[in-house]
Amino acid sequence: MTEFLGTMLFKTGFMSLEVKHLIMWLIGFLFIFLAIKKDYEPLLLLPIGFAIFVVNLPLAGLMEEGGLLRIFYHFGLEWEVIPPLIFLGLGAMTDFGPLIANPKTLLLGAAAQFGVYIAFFGALLIGFKIPEACSIGIIGGADGPTTIYTTVKLAPHLLGATAVAAYSYMSMVPIIQPPIMKLFTTKKERKIIMRQLRPVSRLEKILFPLAATLIICLIVPPAAPLMAMFMIGNLFRESGVVKRLTGAAQNELMNIVTIFLGLSVGATMSADSFLRPQALLVFALGLVAFIFSTGGGLMLAKLMNLFLKEKINPLIGSAGVSAVPMAARVSQKMGAAADPKNFLLMHAMGPNVAGVIGTVVAAGFFISMAGG
Amino acid sequence: MIPWEQAAKIFVFGFSGVFVTLIILVIAILFLGKVISLFNKPKASV
């Protein structure tokens, strides 16, 4: 009997518990706390936090061959299904009207990729290999699905760190960006009031996803899975003839895929793969990327003002990092703080969605030049 | 040993590539806008 109890005890997880597991539980609980108490990206941080917790339960084997989370990870992320499906939902939720009305704001989305390349070089200097440096750099785009897509293609062993860094910084946009925005702009610039955007016709909105898919997928074919799904989701929305599909992409599909995305990402954060100095470096470089991306958007907006008759408020430049729509809301808040009559939200939505496109294009170039 | 040559290529082609791609998209949007506005112009009354 004693022998049997002894054998059974060794079959429980208690006897295999190590300090590293407890540390990972604390990290998982921290994510759950941030999601519930602080409302930081709860749709993702909650499942990620719980997955971190359960994947670090000894002997549970959830990420071993045939384990439940391993199956989610394999078919969802390794097969590159989840990020494009998230983009389908994002496309169905995105209004490209502000971008079409003021297309020069697309350039702000390009400038906001500056941090991506700063972090890329930073990662190389620290000792990461080129594909790893690309995966770390793309965090600066502040676009979770694109970060995941790029990392799975180029450096899957960094997935947990890059994905969590991307989503963490996205949730901290209202904290990280305002000091940088103040640093790079004068009060006079923050007070610039922009003219109301012109109305955009339905036909323009229908033609935009077709044109964008054609141009981007021809120039950067590796970006096609994300861009095509983004634009078909948008075409659903703008066509107005498939309201059921639009609704499904915006709600049911998006919600289901988000659950699997969170669980799959969290599942990659086992103690053995995450508790390394590498992960901390990824977080640090991600923050650098994010700061420089914000600065890049602001600086280009200021530069454009040297040539434009009708000035733009440089605060909308910081919205060129993706993080839709939070970065645009921060621009609005900062503009209104400088002048209560200043309404920048719609103007900032242009660079904000341009940032999504810019990050996908940057990722496409990374994959085509650094992948295999 | 950092492969600087490849890194420089990735930076130069990648960053400028993002700009070029988005500039082409800007041109496409402006072109489509012009074409649509031409078709939408009210016909002159006889």
Image (cartoon, coloured by chain):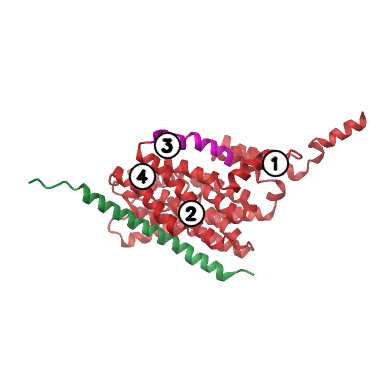
In this view, the mark in front (4 or 2): 2
Please name the residue that numbered disc 2 is placed on. Answer: A223
* Residue A28 image offset from top left, x and y in percent: 65, 40
Q: Colour of chain A?
A: red
Residue A325 is a magenta residue: no
The answer to whether residue A314 is left or right of residue A74 is left
Q: Which chain is green?
A: B
User: How many residues crowd around disc 4 within 10 Å: few (fewer than 14), some, or many (20 or more)?
Assistant: some
In this view, the mark in front (2 or 1): 1
Q: Are marks 2 and 3 on the same chain?
A: yes
Q: Amino acid at mark 4?
A: Met
Q: Return the disc, 2 or 3, that comes first in the chain's sequence.
A: 2
Q: Amino acid at mark 1?
A: Gly
Check residue A83 in the rendering and tell me which mark sits there, or answer none.
none
Please name the residue that numbered disc 4 is placed on. Answer: A346
> Which chain contains the residue that carries disc 4?
A
- Residue at x-position 63% and y-position 48%: A160
Q: Amino acid at mark 3?
A: Thr
Q: Are marks 3 and 1 in contact (CB under 8 Å)?
A: no
- The span picked out in magenta is A242-261
> Which chain contains the residue that carries disc 3?
A
User: How many residues crowd around disc 3 within 10 Å: few (fewer than 14), some, or many (20 or more)?
Assistant: many
Number of marks: 4
Check residue A66 in the rendering and tell me which mark sits there, or answer none.
1
> Which chain contains the residue that carries disc 2?
A
